[in-house]
Image (cartoon, coloured by chain):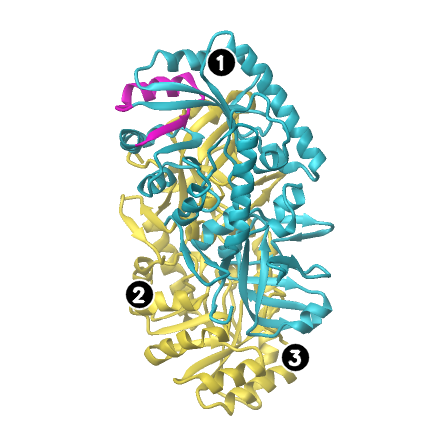
Chain colours: A cyan, B yellow
């Protein structure tokens, strides 16, 4: 880290590739299509690492991200976000060039799209499997059938099946809790798929959260998975129970610019514009990151735990153990595991590998 | 907003210029130097609007931001962040070309800098006037004198005075509370300045928070101010008591992509990567933004108040009044006042004025 002068997002290429291959192998074992979500890393280079694991289809969260990955050679892209019909021109351009799948949750949206689409697209209907964000409830069979019917009578939309991000798995705090959420999601989709199979064929079920995809052991009615965060994992995933500390592939390196012994606080360049203001609570401490050090080819939390407890735009305050405080001087770097790697990566707009290589992201 | 297809940060140029001239006039009335902080807008264009108000000196939060504004013609720049000595090469390059002021809070930092600086810089000592972030306590006269002494014996550093960001003003919830914080800060600096004036001359006191600079009525020992947020203000400043809703110069325009009547919820494209995850509490609602509409040349909250109550990476959930829910359809745009305009602007990386002009920011 000798040459690092400002906040830098370090990427352990080796751990990232292990995470990619572990999830790809799990998908193969369970006979699942694997369409990893790119929103976490937003990088063509990491996309190449996914290709190296024989992955050909991908998931993104915006039209802009679809355009970026289409430019970087991805031909099968799902935009896992309720279709923004104001972006019809961009959707038409994408659909003319790649195999595009979108989310359509309303009959009105299906009708509006059908009028304006100039090339064929596939469409999932999103199911709210418990996260209370977007999607139709899995027991609202009447509405789900209505949307399917409109799609099936459209000229340019093919119904692809059902999509869900079971985001309520983020409330879990153990493997057992994740398994319980996962099995409940599986049961919902089993019932819904059985019901719809009486009328329709050739549709698939795709689910996309990292906790369930990391921990789930049976996938029953699920045909495809699209987790994203697993490439890096983070403190939140470790707390949820999706991963171990040693699976976390990114860490922020921040210069220490000041220190105050009266409070055992290090002041770092590393603020809300680097970490994001995503926070979590560990025991009784609300924090934005955990101080770690490299050890045996991974980052390990420094004990006793020291956290980034305060963030303003450019400043971070690390509340230290007395031991840690003595070990670090102004001008040193401190390494911090992020609470939520997706938001940190989005802000940092690039990575530096352990080997010193620069990896760019979508701008 | 007909041509807007994705989340867009709208800027009311007129309100922004009114905010700029109001603060510039206040500085003149109180005979204060005015060195506005650029971290909020990060834009050369808005910098020009500040120049139009006869402003020649500016404040930034990082070396990168100093480089950007130096490239855009600013010759007197203060980096209001504890000096990051790992960036000595960049500091030397800046100091060779512009009049550069930095913060030096420790004798060791002053010594390290003096060895490596190749051009003259000015240095403020940062005072922690109550925010408990960085800076020396105002009553630690011995340490403050030690740093001044090291600076005064250095070759390339000139002691400029005392700097403080009284960030504890952000805990205020009324003009009266802000006035109380402001007067306490003024008292601290009066005492400290009197004490130091026995030994030193020609140094100044600069303070930089938007609440105190907006509401403060007397400035006593203060010679210069460097607020930043005032160019845009935001919901947090309105809640603190620094501004009225009508003073807020930016709002997020977000496409509505889905809606669920059972919960009176609109789903918008507008998530943590657009707003930031900065939240606030209004009455009993924790939220990330407040729905507003244009009315009489400013944004006014729609009544009864409707908030963005949930954010994931790309999604926002607007919890509506039943009336608002009926007024908006999928494909419409909704306008949201941000909680913290600095972090939202940093994420959005550009503005669209009410007149439709695109304004770029530092990348």
| Pointer 2 residue | B51
Residue A209 visible in the shown view:
no
Q: Residue A26, percent across and down?
A: 57, 35
**Real-space Cα separation, disc 2 to disc 3, in angstroms:** 37 Å
Query: Between B112 and B256, which is closer to the camera in this rendering?
Result: B112
Along the line of sight, which residue is nearer the eye, B106 or A250? A250
Label at residue A143? 1
- Residue matched to label 3: B140
Looking at the rendered structure, the secondary structure element under dot 1 is helix
N-term-proximal mark, 2 vs 3: 2
**Occupied quadrant, residue B58:** bottom left
The secondary element bearing badge 2 is classed as: helix
Q: Which residue corresponds to the image point at 38% horizontal and 30% vertical from the top-left?
A: A84
Q: Residues within 10 Å of mark 1 (few under 14, many from 20)?
A: some
User: Looking at the image, which residue is at 44% across and 39% down?
Assistant: B336
Chain containing mark 3: B
Q: Are marks 2 and 1 in contact (CB under 8 Å)?
A: no
Residue B311 percent location from the top left of the image: 52, 39
Q: Which mark is residue B348?
A: none
Give the residues in magenta.
A98-119
Task: Please check whether the numbered discs 2 and 1 fall on a single chain.
Answer: no
């Amino acid at each position: 880290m000798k040459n690092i002068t400002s906040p830098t997002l370090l990427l352990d290429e080796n751990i990232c590739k292990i995470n990619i291959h572990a999830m790809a192998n799990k998908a193969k074992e369970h006979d699942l299509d694997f369409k990893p979500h790119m929103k976490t890393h937003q990088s063509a280079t990491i996309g190449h690492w996914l290709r190296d694991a024989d992955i050909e289809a991908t998931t993104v969260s915006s039209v802009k991200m679809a355009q970026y990955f289409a430019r970087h050679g991805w031909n099968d892209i799902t935009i896992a976000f309720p279709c923004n019909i104001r972006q019809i021109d961009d959707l038409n351009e994408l659909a003319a060039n790649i195999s595009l799948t979108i989310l359509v949750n309303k009959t009105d949206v299906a009708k509006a799209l059908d009028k304006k689409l100039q090339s064929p697209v596939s469409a999932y209907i999103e199911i709210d499997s418990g996260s209370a964000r977007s999607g139709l409830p899995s027991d609202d069979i009447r509405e789900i059938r209505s949307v399917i019917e409109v799609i099936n009578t459209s000229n340019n939309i093919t119904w692809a099946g059902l999509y869900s991000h079971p985001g309520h798995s983020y409330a879990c705090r153990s493997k057992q809790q994740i398994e319980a959420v996962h099995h409940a999601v599986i049961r919902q989709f089993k019932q819904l798929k059985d019901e719809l199979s009486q009328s329709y064929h050739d549709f698939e079920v795709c689910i996309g959260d990292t906790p369930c995809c990391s921990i789930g052991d049976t996938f029953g009615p699920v045909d495809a998975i699209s987790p994203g965060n697993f490439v890096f994992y983070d403190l939140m995933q470790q707390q949820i129970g999706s991963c171990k500390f040693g699976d976390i592939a990114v860490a922020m390196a921040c210069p220490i610019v000041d220190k105050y012994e009266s409070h055992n606080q290090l002041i770092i360049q590393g603020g809300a514009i680097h970490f994001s203001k995503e926070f979590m609570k560990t025991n009784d401490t609300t924090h934005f990151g955990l101080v770690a050090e490299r050890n045996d080819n991974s980052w390990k939390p420094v004990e006793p735990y020291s956290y980034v407890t305060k963030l303003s735009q450019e400043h971070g305050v690390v509340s230290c153990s007395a031991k840690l405080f003595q070990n670090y001087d102004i001008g040193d770097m401190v390494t911090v595991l992020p609470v939520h790697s997706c938001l940190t990566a989005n802000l940092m707009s690039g990575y530096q590998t352990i080997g010193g290589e620069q990896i760019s992201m979508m701008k």
